[in-house]
Image (tube, helix red, strand yellow):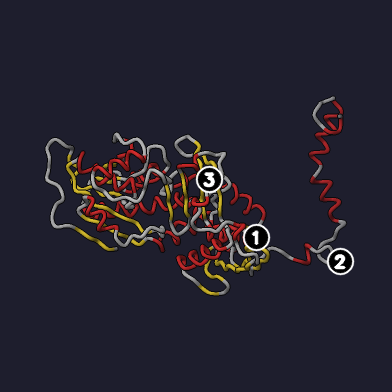
Amino acid sequence: MTTFSTNGSSHIANGDKPNLGKVVLAYSGGLDTSTIIPWLKENYTCEVIAYAADVGQPDDLSGIEDKAITTGASKAHVLDLKEEFIRDYVFPTMRAGAIYERKYLLGTSMARPLIAKKQVEIAQLEGAGAVAHGCTGKGNDQVRFELTFMSLAPELKIIAPWRQWHIESREDAIDYCFAHGVEIEATKNKIYSVDGNLWHMSHEGGLIEDPWEEPPAESYTLTVAPEDAPDEAEYVTISFEQGWPVAIDGQALGPVELVEQLNELGGKHGVGRINMLENRLVGMKSRGVYETPGGTVLVTAHRELEQLTLDKQTMRLKDQLAQTYADLVYNGQWFTPAKDALDAFVDKSQEVVTGDVRLKLYKGSCDAVGMKSPYSLYQENLATFGADDVYHQADAEGFIRLFGLGQKVANQRARAVGLAGTEAIR
């Protein structure tokens, strides 16, 4: 962690304003949070402490502390959270098989509880009585931040400017920043909302909001268009130990390096692009463009290794619980007893998910073409169509009779009493 500060307090108390004392703002340097610093100082008697989290977003954070202080903050904390993000948030969610509404690999959803948790720690370190965030009143992130605050430090006052101020749009925010001399990169001609981290990149707003329109080319920044990807397929082998990815092509890698390499490889082949209409927690549908190249490779490999190593009942139950897990993460319920219980189930299920998966990447596709594990449940002598001494085919006759007995009796009754709706009497 690096910390930068100005000399002394940044604000002289004004009795006409509510006194917040110190407030820690989750600060990205973008449009919304750049607007919030002067707004807080206009509307409250407070010292604003900016806090920026590095979760691998593409933004250059090298000057973010100076920008925060220039904009009116008294101090800026910058934390490198990439390792913790991948190790403690991304990989556990991947092991759970959690995917929201069939497509979304939860890139933004997983980052928010970590960012908010560290914001609480900064507030406690600084003796602050309030925390603030730049989430809009229409989005999911406000819930994710505030549920974390409520779980970890319910005594903190929460300031959510988008639910309080007169600013109603990003265009209004741009005008506010210009009026207060705050330098920003957003323009009214390119008004996309962008969120990125080491796991994914998302784009919303502008033309993307029309579900009939194809997302423009500039909506994608991590991946090439599949039609522009190499004409030759590329193969990669991912190794897992108890569900944790540990190596690429036999080379052991840490979590950050592993994801970075797979992002580059997947992006090169146009893997991991989706655009979707999702059901937001707050009740509306929204359209977003997501890129998760490395994550798509890992999720595909992990799923296929489970096919090899998990028994049928465990795999079916895990698939059912994965949707619940995805909902908890999407809804900001990371720090809950329910998620703790699910994590315990996932940990048990992953004890045998060790092995290697070979994948083929080609023009936007990612397919598992080979897998092996010391815990494999696949036995070729059972599955073969050739002669074998293990499986006696005549045994199937009795199995089928018993398996179909209930169905047989139900249809006999239907014919006897004239019930409609069965194939036997039509």
- Secondary element under disc 3, as helix, strand or loop, is helix
Identity of the amino acid at label 3?
A: Thr
Q: Quadrant of the C terminus?
A: top right
Q: Badge 1 is on which residue?
A: 367
Residue 401: give its label. none
For marks 1 and 2, give the CA distance: 31 Å
Mark 3 or mark 1: which comes first in sequence?
Answer: 3
Nearest to the eye among marks 1 and 2: give it.
1
For numbered disc 2, what is the local secondary structure? loop
Q: Amino acid at mark 1?
A: Asp
Q: How far across and down, in percent of the image, does residue 319 sit?
A: 60, 50
Q: Point out residue 363 in the picture as x, y percentages from the top left corner.
A: 63, 59
Q: Residue furthest bottom?
A: 251
Q: Residue at x 78, y 62 (%)?
A: 383
Q: Which residue is mark 2?
A: 387
In the figure, is residue 169 to the left or right of 251? left
Q: Determine the residue positioned at 58% across, 62% down.
A: 269
Quick one: label 1, few (<14), some, or many (20+) residues within 10 Å?
Answer: some
Residue 349 visible in the current orientation: no
In the rendered image, is residue 230 in sight? Answer: yes
